[in-house]
Amino acid sequence: MSSSTPTYTELKRQLAARVSIAPVYLLHGEEGYYIDELVKDFENLVPEDERDFNLYTMYAPESGIETVMDVCHRYPMMAERQVVIVKEAQTVRADALNRLHHYVSQPNLTTVLVICCRGAQAKGKELLASVKKNGVIFESKRLSERNILPVISSLIKEKGLNVDVKSLSMLRDYIGTDISRLYNEIDKLALILGSGAMVTPEAVERNIGVSKDYNNFELIDAVNQRNAAKAFSIIGYFADNPKNNPTVMTVSSLFNQFSNLLIYHYTRDKSQSGYMDALGLRSPWALKGYEQAAGNYNVRQTIDIISAIREFDTRSKGIGSRQNEYGLLKDLIFRIFTTRGIIG
């Protein structure tokens, strides 16, 4: 194998090409979507007309570890390989699951054993060590709001499409961290737009249903410009369309913006490259918003606004307030525009 810990995309490519197939795979982690999709790919290693003899789907709590090992030691029926998929391994006690290391340490090379711990980390130090030595470990990590943008961007490029910054923001706000939904929506765009096309705000609005004028990207732009009329118009739209515009995404965008603005203010290297390095930006274009915001919000104002955002988060959970969350959001935007940032 080229890597004992491949990415989801790398592993799918290897399975589709039938190259570098290992005798043992351990799929574990919090995000169930990746594991479910990979299981389908492992099933496809066995042709339809051979599945009655060479494809075994076993459930760890019902089958027992000894039974799993017995099946793995068998040889395929008139075929190159057999595939044994063990599901729900996360429900088995650590000491029981760990017994699989006896097989994994000397696996049958005509068997592909796939151990699935869906939604949890795998148990058993000896098992993990044996799989690392003789097979492949794939950890299916749940996405967070912090790392979703690179994933969306990478997936769009894999589909042969291009995308601009605003469209990425719109997709993030609409899809969130729902991986299944993310893949479905990107597949839809790839099918409709075709290879080499640009994913634009208009394309997102037309094909996915997110407004190109009323979204968090435009709200941040309005806040940077201190354009109160535009900001409150967007918040009003959010309140009228709460399903597609959850406040948690909006406040997360505002918090990230002003947290980065604070970094911008305190960056010692005031050159373009200095700011980009400090903020982790890839394009000078992304600096424009911070340059504009820095002229409208000084350091003290920025600190006060971050405090106001944190207060909103507490109050939106019903602590100290019974006000509607969109009403609280309007109050937050008002505080952002009126914060004086006076020391003392």
Image (spheres, rainbow, N blue to C red):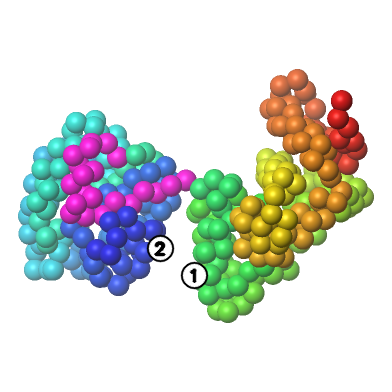
Q: Answer left or right for 154 relative to 208.
A: left
Res 164 quadrant in image: bottom right
Decide if residue 68 is on the left or right side of residue 182. Answer: left
Residue at screen point 58% across, 47% down: 146
Cβ–Cβ below 8 Å for labels 2 and 1?
yes
Residue at the spot x=18%, y=47% of the render? 130
Asked which secondary structure carries label 1, the reply is helix
Up the image or down, 302 lies above or below 49; here it is above
Q: Quadrant of the N terminus?
A: bottom left
Return the x and y of residue 204 as percentages of the image width and height. Answer: 68, 65
Compared to 23, does 95 lie above or below? above
Point out residue 192 in the picture as x, y percentages from the top left corner: 60, 74
Q: Which residue is mark 1?
A: 158
Q: Which mark is residue 167?
A: none
Q: Name the quadrant containing residue 330.
A: top right
Residue 133 is one of the magenta-drawn residues: yes
Q: Residue 106 versus residue 292: which sits nearer the camera?
A: 292
Locate residue 110 relative to residue 21 in the image: left or right.
left
Q: CA distance from mark 2 to mark 1?
A: 9 Å
Q: Answer with mark 2 or mark 1, whichever residue precedes in sequence.
A: 2
Identify the image quadrant of the C terminus.
top right
Q: Is residue 208 magenta?
A: no
Judged from the image, the secondary structure of the residue bearing numbered disc 2 is helix
Q: Is residue 246 visible?
A: no
The x, y position of residue 231, in whole percent, is: 86, 49
Q: Position of residue 188 (x, y in %)?
A: 57, 67
Write the residue at 79% across / 41% down.
299
